[in-house]
Amino acid sequence: MRDLMMLGAMAFMVPMALMHGFVAFLLWGYTTVLAPANFLYGFMQDFRFNFLFAAIALASLFLRRLPQAGRFRLDRTTVLLLLFFVHTIVSAVVAPEDNLLRYGRIEGFSKGMAFVLLMPLFITSRLRLHAALLVIVLGLGLHGVVEGLKFVASGGSHRIAGIGGSSLSDNNLVAVGLAMLLPLFIYFVQQMEGRLARWAALAGLGLTILAVVATNSRGGLIALVVLGLWYVMTTRNKALALLLVVAAAGAVLLL
């Protein structure tokens, strides 16, 4: 049934991607962080969703069919990203031969770097940036919400091993990935105009925090502490922020 539902969704998503290159870019990012194969068990499980939307997005870019396309600029951030990419490639090349995971890791990393380096060409306005952040929250945030609900339903005994078929394939990686998502949830809590949307973002924030705890990752715990301190130091209402952080820390310790 899930595979049929995904097939039906693709019947709408593919035409939308073909009509607008920016939509293809959004769907490229969405299917990457969502990793749909984890929710499918039939004929759609092996379908390469992100490859399809990446191909459509790149085709719209090279064929000059992308409205309001940006320009590639070799600024400081881009140079640092390129140097980091070169460093990673060199590290993979000189790694021990018995490291069987390096080729899969470098392939996934290269795809992620391509997506990041192409962002300035597709994201050229505040509205597009808002849409891109929303897509990331809806994609990766689904894992945080689902795993957080499992953690609550199990009374705190549920453990997350990672998201299979993605770069967040173990508990430490998925803990850091979900922790990086928390500032985006805070952003939408502050920016959304509708009360229901704000409450949904707040619920997603709380459940994703529980999902980080469910990874049983010490790195994830450190990330939560750092984010809590960052939130207290940067928010205007520091007293309320400190109260919320202390309450969240108490809940984490109890769980």
Image (spheres, grey):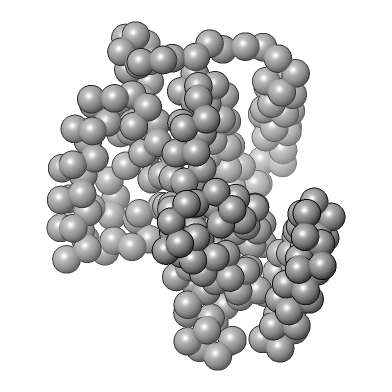
Towards the viewer: 105 or 121: 121
Towards the viewer: 58 or 224: 224
Q: Estimate the x, y position of residue 74 in percent, counting from the top left.
A: 67, 12
Residue name at image x 46 percent, y 23 percent = 122
Instruction: Tell me: residue 255, above or below residue 204.
Output: below
Residue 73 can be seen in this image: yes
- Answer with the quarter of the image where residue 76 lies: top right
In this picture, residue 248 sits left or right of residue 9: right
Instruction: Tell me: residue 215, above or below residue 236.
Output: below
- Quadrant where the C terminus sits is bottom right
In this picture, residue 127 sits left or right of residue 78: left
Q: Estimate the x, y position of residue 148 in percent, counting from the top left.
A: 52, 74
In this picture, residue 35 sits left or right of residue 189: left
Residue name at image x 24 percent, y 40 percent = 13
Residue name at image x 50 percent, y 88 percent = 154
Residue name at image x 22 percent, y 63 percent = 2
